[in-house]
Image (tube, grey):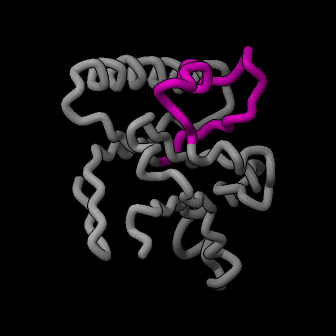
Amino acid sequence: MTANHNGGTFDFHLIVLHLKAGGSAQEQSKRKTACRLLKEHLDEELEQGEELDFLVVGDWNDKLDDPPDSNVFTLFLEDTLQYRFLTFPLAGNSYYGSYIGGGGYGSLIDHILATRDALNEYDGGITMTLRLDDETDRYGQLISDHRPVMATFPVFRK
Protein backbone atom coordinates (compact mmCIF):
# COMPACT_ATOMS: atom_id res chain seq x y z
CA MET A 1 0.00 0.00 0.00
CA THR A 2 1.01 3.57 -0.49
CA ALA A 3 -0.61 6.30 1.56
CA ASN A 4 -0.11 9.92 0.51
CA HIS A 5 -1.32 12.99 2.37
CA ASN A 6 -0.08 16.59 2.70
CA GLY A 7 3.10 15.72 0.81
CA GLY A 8 3.90 12.78 3.09
CA THR A 9 4.21 9.23 1.77
CA PHE A 10 4.15 5.94 3.62
CA ASP A 11 4.73 2.69 1.68
CA PHE A 12 3.86 -0.45 3.61
CA HIS A 13 2.36 -3.91 3.45
CA LEU A 14 -1.02 -4.21 5.12
CA ILE A 15 -2.21 -7.55 6.45
CA VAL A 16 -5.79 -7.73 7.70
CA LEU A 17 -6.67 -10.74 9.81
CA HIS A 18 -9.46 -12.26 11.85
CA LEU A 19 -8.27 -14.96 14.25
CA LYS A 20 -10.43 -17.72 15.68
CA ALA A 21 -12.85 -16.49 18.34
CA GLY A 22 -13.73 -18.20 21.60
CA GLY A 23 -12.31 -18.93 25.00
CA SER A 24 -11.73 -22.69 24.86
CA ALA A 25 -8.25 -24.17 25.02
CA GLN A 26 -8.65 -25.44 21.46
CA GLU A 27 -9.62 -22.00 20.14
CA GLN A 28 -6.76 -20.36 22.02
CA SER A 29 -4.39 -22.97 20.59
CA LYS A 30 -5.56 -22.09 17.07
CA ARG A 31 -4.82 -18.41 17.70
CA LYS A 32 -1.39 -19.25 19.10
CA THR A 33 -0.60 -21.40 16.06
CA ALA A 34 -1.82 -18.66 13.72
CA CYS A 35 0.44 -16.13 15.49
CA ARG A 36 3.42 -18.48 15.18
CA LEU A 37 2.79 -18.96 11.44
CA LEU A 38 2.27 -15.23 10.93
CA LYS A 39 5.51 -14.42 12.74
CA GLU A 40 7.41 -17.00 10.68
CA HIS A 41 6.04 -15.40 7.50
CA LEU A 42 6.88 -11.86 8.63
CA ASP A 43 10.36 -12.91 9.78
CA GLU A 44 11.00 -14.38 6.32
CA GLU A 45 9.77 -11.20 4.61
CA LEU A 46 11.94 -9.02 6.85
CA GLU A 47 14.99 -11.20 6.18
CA GLN A 48 14.54 -10.64 2.42
CA GLY A 49 14.75 -6.93 3.11
CA GLU A 50 12.69 -5.72 0.15
CA GLU A 51 9.83 -4.08 2.05
CA LEU A 52 10.28 -3.80 5.79
CA ASP A 53 7.19 -1.81 6.74
CA PHE A 54 4.36 -4.11 7.76
CA LEU A 55 1.14 -3.36 9.61
CA VAL A 56 -1.04 -6.25 10.73
CA VAL A 57 -4.51 -5.10 11.75
CA GLY A 58 -7.75 -6.73 12.69
CA ASP A 59 -9.64 -8.87 15.15
CA TRP A 60 -6.95 -10.88 16.94
CA ASN A 61 -9.64 -12.16 19.36
CA ASP A 62 -7.32 -12.12 22.37
CA LYS A 63 -5.90 -9.73 24.95
CA LEU A 64 -2.29 -8.55 24.93
CA ASP A 65 -2.06 -8.49 28.71
CA ASP A 66 -2.92 -12.14 29.35
CA PRO A 67 -0.43 -13.97 31.61
CA PRO A 68 2.64 -15.28 29.73
CA ASP A 69 1.64 -18.95 30.08
CA SER A 70 -1.64 -18.32 28.23
CA ASN A 71 -0.67 -15.37 26.02
CA VAL A 72 -1.02 -16.19 22.32
CA PHE A 73 1.11 -13.13 21.42
CA THR A 74 4.25 -14.16 23.33
CA LEU A 75 6.39 -14.62 20.20
CA PHE A 76 5.67 -11.06 19.08
CA LEU A 77 5.84 -9.53 22.56
CA GLU A 78 9.25 -11.09 23.24
CA ASP A 79 10.72 -9.93 19.90
CA THR A 80 10.92 -6.26 20.85
CA LEU A 81 13.60 -5.58 18.24
CA GLN A 82 11.28 -6.38 15.30
CA TYR A 83 7.67 -5.95 16.48
CA ARG A 84 5.41 -3.76 18.57
CA PHE A 85 1.69 -3.75 19.12
CA LEU A 86 0.58 -0.15 18.78
CA THR A 87 -2.43 -1.09 20.89
CA PHE A 88 -0.33 -2.33 23.83
CA PRO A 89 -0.51 0.95 25.80
CA LEU A 90 -4.32 0.61 25.77
CA ALA A 91 -4.34 -2.95 27.13
CA GLY A 92 -5.99 -3.55 30.46
CA ASN A 93 -8.11 -0.38 30.39
CA SER A 94 -11.74 -1.23 29.66
CA TYR A 95 -12.38 2.33 28.45
CA TYR A 96 -10.32 1.46 25.36
CA GLY A 97 -11.96 -1.93 24.89
CA SER A 98 -12.73 -2.75 21.29
CA TYR A 99 -15.19 -5.58 21.93
CA ILE A 100 -18.53 -4.32 23.19
CA GLY A 101 -20.64 -7.44 22.74
CA GLY A 102 -21.50 -10.32 25.01
CA GLY A 103 -19.58 -11.25 28.14
CA GLY A 104 -16.30 -9.75 26.94
CA TYR A 105 -17.52 -6.15 27.11
CA GLY A 106 -14.60 -3.77 27.37
CA SER A 107 -11.95 -6.23 26.18
CA LEU A 108 -9.29 -4.97 23.79
CA ILE A 109 -9.05 -7.79 21.25
CA ASP A 110 -8.58 -5.77 18.05
CA HIS A 111 -4.97 -4.79 17.52
CA ILE A 112 -2.42 -3.12 15.28
CA LEU A 113 0.99 -4.77 15.03
CA ALA A 114 3.88 -2.86 13.43
CA THR A 115 7.31 -3.98 12.34
CA ARG A 116 10.40 -2.03 13.44
CA ASP A 117 10.70 -0.04 10.21
CA ALA A 118 7.04 0.96 10.26
CA LEU A 119 7.66 2.34 13.75
CA ASN A 120 9.92 4.98 12.21
CA GLU A 121 6.89 6.48 10.46
CA TYR A 122 4.77 5.99 13.59
CA ASP A 123 7.19 7.79 15.93
CA GLY A 124 5.04 10.32 17.78
CA GLY A 125 1.84 8.69 16.52
CA ILE A 126 -1.33 8.02 18.43
CA THR A 127 -3.37 4.83 18.70
CA MET A 128 -6.91 4.82 20.02
CA THR A 129 -10.16 2.95 20.09
CA LEU A 130 -12.89 4.94 18.38
CA ARG A 131 -15.85 4.88 20.75
CA LEU A 132 -18.42 5.20 17.98
CA ASP A 133 -21.04 3.56 20.15
CA ASP A 134 -20.93 6.72 22.31
CA GLU A 135 -21.80 8.76 19.22
CA THR A 136 -24.28 6.56 17.39
CA ASP A 137 -27.41 5.12 18.95
CA ARG A 138 -27.73 1.35 18.58
CA TYR A 139 -24.19 1.08 17.14
CA GLY A 140 -23.84 -2.45 18.50
CA GLN A 141 -27.13 -3.57 16.97
CA LEU A 142 -26.77 -1.84 13.61
CA ILE A 143 -23.05 -1.78 12.85
CA SER A 144 -20.78 -4.05 14.88
CA ASP A 145 -20.01 -5.53 18.27
CA HIS A 146 -16.46 -4.17 17.83
CA ARG A 147 -15.20 -0.62 17.97
CA PRO A 148 -12.62 0.38 15.35
CA VAL A 149 -9.02 0.77 16.45
CA MET A 150 -7.07 3.54 14.74
CA ALA A 151 -3.44 4.67 14.55
CA THR A 152 -2.26 8.02 13.24
CA PHE A 153 1.16 8.37 11.66
CA PRO A 154 2.94 11.76 12.01
CA VAL A 155 4.44 11.39 8.52
CA PHE A 156 1.18 12.97 7.38
CA ARG A 157 1.17 15.93 9.77
CA LYS A 158 2.17 19.34 8.58
Q: Is residue 153 visible?
A: yes
Q: Is residue 146 visible?
A: no
Q: Where 50 sits versus 110, above or below?
A: above
Q: Is residue 95 left or right of residue 32?
A: right
Spot occupied by residue 88 in the image (x, y as percentages of width and height):
66, 42
Spot occupied by residue 104 in the image (x, y as percentages of width and height):
74, 48
Spot occupied by residue 23 in the image (x, y as percentages of width and height):
68, 31
Q: Residue lying farthest front? A: 158
Quarter occupied by residue 147: bottom right
Spot occupied by residue 7 in the image (x, y as percentages of width and height):
27, 72
In front here: 37 or 88? 88
Q: Where 119 sits versus 132, above or below?
A: above
Quarter occupied by residue 94: bottom right
Report the residue at 75% width, 29% height from top. 66
Q: Is residue 101 left or right of residue 121?
A: right
Q: Where 109 sits versus 94, above or below?
A: above
Report the residue at 53% width, 40% height from top. 60
Q: Any magenta on residue 99?
A: no
Part of the protein shown in magenta: 58-85
Q: Is residue 71 left or right of residue 85?
A: right
Quarter occupied by residue 3: bottom left
Report the residue at 58% width, 60% height from top. 126
Q: Any magenta on residue 65?
A: yes
Report the residue at 55% width, 19% height from top. 75
In front here: 65 or 103? 65
In front here: 150 or 123? 123
